[in-house]
Image: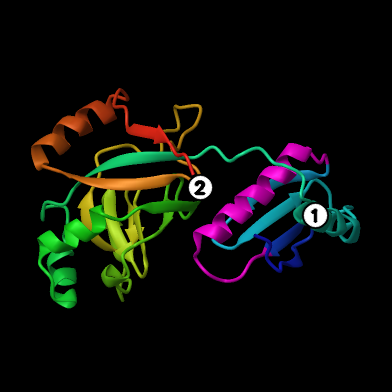
Amino acid sequence: MGYKLTYKTFGERSVLIEWPPMIDESVLLDILTFKSKITTKKIKSIANINSAYNSLLISFNSIEADFKSEVALLKKMYSSKKHVKKLKRRIWKVPVCYDTTFGIDLNEIALAKGITKHELIKRHTQGVYSVYFIGFLPGFLYLGGLDETLSMPRKDTPRLQVDKGAVAIGGNQTGVYPNESPGGWNIIGNSPVLFFDATKESPCFAKAGDIIQFYEISKDIYDDIKILADEGVYQLESEELHD
C-alpha cells in the first residue's frame, strides 16, 4: 500500500518523513519496508534512520547534504516497485505476574471499567501487540494493539519511581518499564524478564515489527524466572512470524 507522505527538513542535517497520523499496523509495515529499502541501498550520505509510530527520521553525515536531491531520491525509492526482502519478524511470549503486590493500579482500573480484575487480566493477555518503536528508555517497547476497553488516561501526577519490569497502561498503549524510572502509566503487573541488557550484542530482544504476547504467571513462577533472568540464562519463548 502506498501513502501520501510529507518530507520536511528537521534540524541542520535531517529529513522527517511522515505518514498519516495514526497507530496502525499497515502504516508500521509500510514504514519498516521503506526503511529496509533505504538501508539495503547503503546510501553513503545517510548516517542514521529512526522510526516512530508514523514517521522516519533520516539523518545525514554532513550539513552540506543537498536536501532537495536527497528527498527526490527518497521519493523515487518509496514509489519503486522493486522487490524488497521480506521483513523478518518474531512473536515473543512474555510472562507477567498480575499479583496485586505488583499491579498497584489493577483495582482502580477494574473499578473504572466496571469489570473484575480477572476480566481485566484476561483482556490484557488476549491482546496481540505490535512493537512500533523503542524509546523513552533503552528497551522501552511502544506497543499498539491494546483492547480499547482497557484504555486508561495517564496519571495526573506521575510517580517518581516505577519498578523495573512494571507492566502498565497509558492511554491506548501498553508497555513494560525496562528499568526503574519515573512514570505516569497505570501499573497492572510486572514481568521478570530483562527488556534491556547492555552486555548482549542485541541489548533489546525485540525490534520494531515484532509481536509481543503476554501470559499470566504466579508469584512463585515469577520468582523462579527472575532468578534465571538476573543470572542472564533465561530464554524467552519466541517463534518466527509468518504473515
- Residue 214 position in % (x across, y down): 27, 47
Foreground: 45 or 150?
150
Mark 2 crowd level (few <14, some 14–19, many ≥20, 10 Å Cα): many
Q: Is residue 26 above or below residue 21?
A: above
- The residue under the point 71% across, 69% down is 4
- The residue range painted magenta reads 18-44
Foreground: 115 or 63?
115
- Residue 1 position in % (x across, y down): 64, 60
Q: How many marks?
A: 2
**Helix, strand or loop at disc 2?**
loop
Q: Amino acid at mark 1?
A: Leu
Q: Is residue 4 above or below residue 213?
A: below
Residue 74's mark? Answer: 1
Q: Amino acid at mark 2?
A: Gly
- The residue under the point 80% across, 54% down is 74
Q: Label 2 belongs to which residue?
A: 209
**Overall secondary structure of the magenta section:** helix
